[in-house]
Amino acid sequence: MKKLTVTALLILTTGVFCQECDKYKAKVDSLMAEFNAIKEKMQDPGITRDVYDDLYSIYTDSWDEIVETQKEQKKCLESQKKTVKVKVEPKKVDKDLPQLFNAKWASARQTVKDALRKQSNLKLAETDDSVLEYKGGKYLGSQVEKWQFNFISKKLYACQIVFQAVPDKNALKLYDELSRKLIELYGEPSYEKNRFPSSYKDDKIRISSIMNGSVTIYNKWLFRNDDILRIGINENGKVMITYLVDALYKKTK
């Protein structure tokens, strides 16, 4: 969903679910009921290993079929839409993109390295000329697995912060916690995509759908010059924050 200062997206549809697309929704609902029933059977403490293995095979096949059916449902719905787009003005943060460790964006690699040398809790990892990677430290109060500072034309244009998994907090809970902290700092996101199909009740299923690419979630803020701050969950199921200088990023394309 986009937060816009000017609402300028008109969507004309032939119906949310036409009869043709309805069959995919019905199939997904049926498969999810079967999927959850199998899951409950697998949690039976008295189950034998052979029965568990048989159920697990059905469990994984059912999940694959759910994902494929949802993709077909999405294609069907998109084919029913006629979308007219005009100029949109997303909400922006009226500030420059925040610096990390006082390292200015567009700084040279050695300048960034010198700034980070003052951070005793960060350890430099193996890197090449286009990347500086560090391990450890904290950001927004949470433990970081790694920091990747990226360079183009010898100038700092991006940083990716990957957070460590927390034993008592899954990726979705950590994502929500860090998103709230960013909202406190910068207000509501310019863009957000945080919806799951209504049948996805279990966080494990939701995280699995993110990792296999069938669902994407994120919050994204635009700063001056269209620079970006984005939080999401990556393909490894880890929460990741990305800082990006738009003008320099365009040179990488």
Image (cartoon, helix red, strand yellow):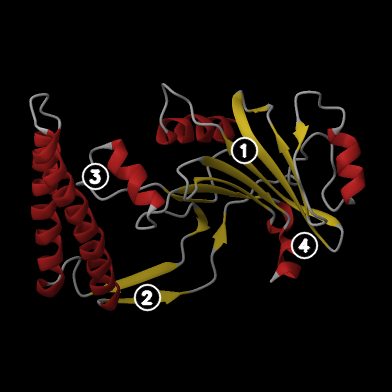
CB under 8 Å between discs 1 and 4: no
Determine which quarter of the picture holds residue 125: top right
Distance CA(mark 4)–CA(mark 3)? 39 Å
* Point 14% across, 51% down: residue: 58
Q: Quarter of the image containing the N terminus?
A: bottom left
| Rendered image: mark on residue 186 | 1
Amino acid type at mark 2? Thr
| Rendered image: mark on residue 248 | 4
| Label 2 Cα crowd, 10 Å radius (few <14 / some 14-19 / many 20+) | few
Between circles 1 and 4, the one closer to the viewer is: 4
Between circles 2 and 3, the one closer to the viewer is: 3
Tag 1 or tag 3, which sits nearer the N-term? 1
Distance CA(mark 2)–CA(mark 3)? 28 Å
136 lies left or right of 232: right
| Rendered image: mark on residue 83 | 2
Vertical placement of 175 versus 6: above or below?
Answer: above
Distance CA(mark 1)–CA(mark 2)? 31 Å
Amino acid type at mark 3? Tyr
Residue annotated with mark 3: 200
Between circles 2 and 4, the one closer to the viewer is: 4
CB under 8 Å between discs 3 and 1: no
Vertical placement of 42 versus 234: above or below?
Answer: above
- The secondary structure type at the circle numbered 4 is helix
| Farthest residue, direction front | 50
Tag 4 or tag 1, which sits nearer the N-term? 1
| Label 1 Cα crowd, 10 Å radius (few <14 / some 14-19 / many 20+) | some
* Point 54% across, 71% down: residue: 87
In the rendered image, residue 226, in percent from the top left (x then y), is placed at: 68, 58
Between circles 3 and 1, the one closer to the viewer is: 3
Tag 4 or tag 2, which sits nearer the N-term? 2
In the rendered image, residue 172, in percent from the top left (x then y), is placed at: 41, 36
